[in-house]
Image (cartoon, rainbow, N blue to C red):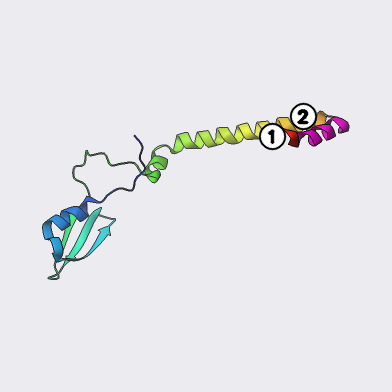
Amino acid sequence: MLTLQPRQRVGHDILLARHGNHISTMRYDRTNDCIIAMLDDGSWDSAPNMIAPSLEMPETLASVFRKDWRFLSVACVAMVTVAAVAMGISVEMANHMSTTELQALLVSYPAF
């Protein structure tokens, strides 16, 4: 089931469980995918953001685009193609109508 919720960083919970109220600041280290905390005594501690590597995280909008970019690209191209064909057909139909038929169509169109 696709929920598209932001991913929760479990490193915060791990550090809070280890140190409780003795944490001064916490920051997210993107390069190592971990949370780093500075403690009251000036020391540092870190915790990973994964409980288990095989655990599947909830999907985000970015992960859906990253995973399904081929399908989304093909669907976009198909919709643009259908729109272009429909526009071409309507322009050709308008070109083959006489002036009186076109005028009657334009006058009666807002009624629908």
Q: In the displayed image of the protein, which residue is found farthest to the bottom?
A: 41
Q: Amino acid at mark 2?
A: Met
Which residue appears at 17% of the width and 58% of the height? 46
Vertical placement of 2 versus 35: above or below? above
Vertical placement of 11 versus 110: above or below? below
Q: Quadrant of residue 30?
A: bottom left
For disc 1, the neighbor class at 10 Å (few under 14, some 14 to 19, many from 20) is: few
Observer-nearest of 94 and 43 = 94
Q: Earlier in the sequence, mark 1 or mark 2?
A: 1
Q: Is 103 placed left or right of 21 in the picture? A: right
Q: Secondary structure at mark 1?
A: helix
Q: Is 90 placed left or right of 69 in the picture? A: right
Q: Amino acid at mark 1?
A: Met
Within the magenta stretch, is there residue 52?
no
- Residue 14 screen position, x and y as percent: 16, 53
- Residue 1 screen position, x and y as percent: 34, 34
Q: Quadrant of residue 58?
A: top left
Vertical placement of 104 versus 49: above or below? above
Prevailing secondary structure of the magenta residues: helix
The disc placed on residue 93 is: 2
In the picture, which quadrant includes the C terminus?
Answer: top right
Could you give the CA–CA distance between mark 1 and mark 2, rounded to whole angstroms? 10 Å
For disc 2, the neighbor class at 10 Å (few under 14, some 14 to 19, many from 20) is: few
Q: Give the residue at mark 1.
A: 87
- Residue 27 screen position, x and y as percent: 25, 61
| Residue segment shown in magenta | 98-109
Q: Quadrant of residue 90?
A: top right
- Residue 80 screen position, x and y as percent: 60, 36
Within the magenta stretch, is there residue 108?
yes
